[in-house]
Image (spheres, rainbow, N blue to C red):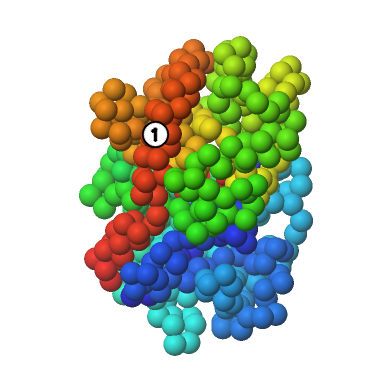
């Protein structure tokens, strides 16, 4: 079975969030169940060093935004089909935004080109390579299924995965022509969303299957509360919509062999985890020797993640003997809020603004609990890293968080099944309540360690979800 993935990020090469982790880890997991997955990815500057090692396998003259060529490279065990189109991707700044944080004005062309290149490869543009299924990820790749359908019915089937429905790729109708889209498909049952073109809506309507990254989120997005305006489209397509839970790369995230840690550990040597708390505290200027738990946050700082409620709970957390370490970047007011919190509570609260992959591993290893009070969360990966590192997740009961963490209620504790703390009220009082529960559990080392061991036993690999994707592909092909 040959699957062509189309995506705008892929770890460890280019990453702004969880999408990259998934696209970076899924191909290897699929290979273990006999699926050959190659990834079409824009050649952004961090990928330039790979280009000379690759082979040009095809060229396109007429992509949206100009010509591009596809360079096939093997790196980190993955086969990448890099879309080399310097006029679209060779620029400083971020993947989607310029250096000032503003969306690139030609994002429709950049990801229109990516989507079209994906569709053309799926239709046989590369000699001796005929994928069975095209798998598009998020809005940036969502026009691929549209271009396939425009080319007729006799093209490979497609599947689109929603990693976050909040990002829909919405542009004014004037871009239709430049994207070579059929103007007679521009209506509410097609590509139009309230007068605009929506990449994601197009993908949802014209793909053969739709998945999202957890079963709970698959149900939630059928409702106005979570569907972000696309609930009607999704309800109409509910028979082909399903949730497949994300896994994680258990090699990249393995506390027993993680070279970025101060001291590796596993479920049998949990005492060694303490050396990581000391290392993290020293690095961040937190006091060591505190009797309470160290909570951490590793996150994009956006309203999705509910971190404004954490800010309000900081005084309570500190007064009750706990500490907090924050790693993140995003909305300026949240960045400033956490900087101010660190200043107000020196030695007890520390904030590192920025994106630092390596440091995120030490945060997971060195903390006792990780706070994830998201307002919505399609799957979430940091709670899975937390489980794997014996860093108990404290999560809102939503989306994939609800599907992956077992709350420390009495029944779960008796059954030794509890792996974390789940709460429903994403407000400062709601957080204060759950923080109190965590502090009380932490004060009972036997209970805490038994929860850590349950957490570390919880299956977080890609194994079962890779099989679920394989079955979906087989169904389509
Ligand atoms: N400052 C920082 N420094 C270093 N690393 C940082 C960081 N901030 C975040 N990260 C890392 O970025 C990733 C974030 O992944 P998440 O799944 O938690 O959320 P995201 O909202 O980006 O993903 C979306 O897509 C994924 C994938 O499907 C879904 O799980 C999720 O629910 C959905 O919102 C994790 O690997 C995390 O460690």
- Identify which residue is drawn at 70% across, 80% down: 52
Who is closer to the viewer here, 344 or 96?
344
Q: Quadrant of the C terminus?
A: bottom left
Q: Position of residue 219 (x, y in %)?
A: 30, 38
Please identify the residue farthest to the bottom as the structure is shown: 128
- Left or right: where does residue 275 sit relative to residue 218? right
Q: Position of residue 104 (x, y in %)?
A: 68, 50
Q: Position of residue 316 (x, y in %)?
A: 58, 13
Q: Is residue 367 above or below residue 471?
A: above
Q: Quadrant of the N terminus?
A: bottom left
Q: Is residue 158 above or below residue 21?
A: below
- Identify which residue is drawn at 69% across, 33% down: 281
Q: Is residue 417 above or below residue 349?
A: below
Q: Is residue 34 above or below residue 228?
A: below
- Left or right: where does residue 216 sit relative to residue 368? left
- Identify which residue is drawn at 44% across, 83% down: 129
- Left or right: where does residue 386 sit relative to residue 208? right
Ligand 1 picture quarter: top right
Q: Element type at marker 1?
A: helix
Residue 363 visible somewhere in the drawing: no
- Identify which residue is drawn at 57% across, 50% down: 264
Who is closer to the viewer here, 456 or 244?
456
Who is closer to the viewer here, 310 or 244?
310
Count of picture labels: 1
Q: Position of residue 321 (x, y in %)?
A: 59, 17
At label 1, counting other C-alpha atoms closer than 10 Å, the crowd grade (few under 14, some 14-19, many 20 or more) is many
**Residue marked by disc 1:** 451
């Amino acid at each position: 079975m040959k699957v062509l993935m189309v995506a705008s990020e892929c770890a460890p090469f280019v990453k702004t969030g969880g999408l990259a982790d998934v696209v970076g880890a899924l191909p290897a997991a699929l290979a273990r169940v006999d699926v050959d997955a190659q990834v079409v990815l824009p050649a952004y500057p961090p990928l330039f060093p790979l280009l000379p090692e690759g082979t040009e396998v095809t060229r396109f003259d007429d992509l949206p935004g100009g010509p591009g060529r596809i360079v096939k490279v093997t790196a980190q065990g993955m086969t990448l089909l890099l879309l080399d189109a310097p006029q679209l991707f060779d620029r400083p700044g971020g993947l989607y935004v310029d250096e000032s944080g503003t969306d690139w004005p030609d994002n429709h062309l950049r990801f229109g080109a990516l989507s079209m290149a994906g569709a053309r490869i799926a239709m046989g543009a590369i000699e001796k390579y005929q994928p069975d299924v095209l798998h598009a990820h998020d809005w940036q790749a969502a026009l691929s299924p549209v271009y396939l359908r425009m080319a007729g019915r006799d093209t490979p089937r497609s599947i689109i995965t929603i990693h976050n429905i909040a990002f829909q790729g919405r542009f004014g109708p004037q871009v239709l022509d430049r994207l070579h889209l059929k103007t007679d498909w521009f209506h509410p049952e097609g590509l139009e969303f309230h007068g605009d073109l929506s990449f994601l809506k197009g993908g949802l309507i014209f793909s053969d299957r739709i998945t999202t990254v957890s079963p709970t989120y698959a149900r939630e997005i059928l409702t106005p509360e979570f569907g972000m305006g696309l609930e009607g489209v999704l309800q109409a397509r509910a028979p082909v919509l399903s949730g497949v839970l994300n896994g994680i790369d258990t090699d990249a995230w393995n506390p027993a062999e993680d070279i970025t840690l101060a001291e590796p550990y596993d479920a049998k040597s949990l005492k060694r985890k303490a050396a990581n708390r000391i290392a993290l505290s020293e690095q961040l200027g937190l006091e060591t020797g505190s009797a309470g738990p160290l909570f951490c946050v590793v996150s994009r700082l956006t309203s999705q993640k509910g971190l404004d409620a954490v800010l309000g709970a900081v005084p309570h957390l500190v007064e009750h003997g706990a500490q907090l370490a924050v790693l993140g970047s995003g909305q300026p007011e949240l960045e400033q809020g956490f900087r101010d919190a660190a200043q107000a509570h020196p030695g007890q609260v520390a904030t590192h603004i920025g994106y630092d992959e390596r440091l995120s591993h030490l945060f997971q290893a060195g903390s006792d609990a990780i706070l994830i009070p998201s307002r919505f969360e399609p799957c979430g990966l940091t709670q899975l890293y937390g489980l794997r590192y014996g860093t108990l997740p404290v999560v809102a009961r939503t989306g994939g968080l609800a599907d992956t963490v077992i709350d420390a209620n009495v029944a779960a504790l008796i059954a030794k099944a509890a792996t974390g703390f789940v709460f429903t009220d994403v407000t400062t009082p709601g957080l204060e309540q759950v923080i109190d529960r965590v502090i009380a559990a932490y004060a009972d080392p036997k209970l805490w360690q038994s929860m850590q061991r349950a957490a570390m036993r919880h299956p977080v690999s890609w194994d079962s979800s890779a099989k679920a994707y394989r079955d979906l592909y087989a169904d389509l092909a």
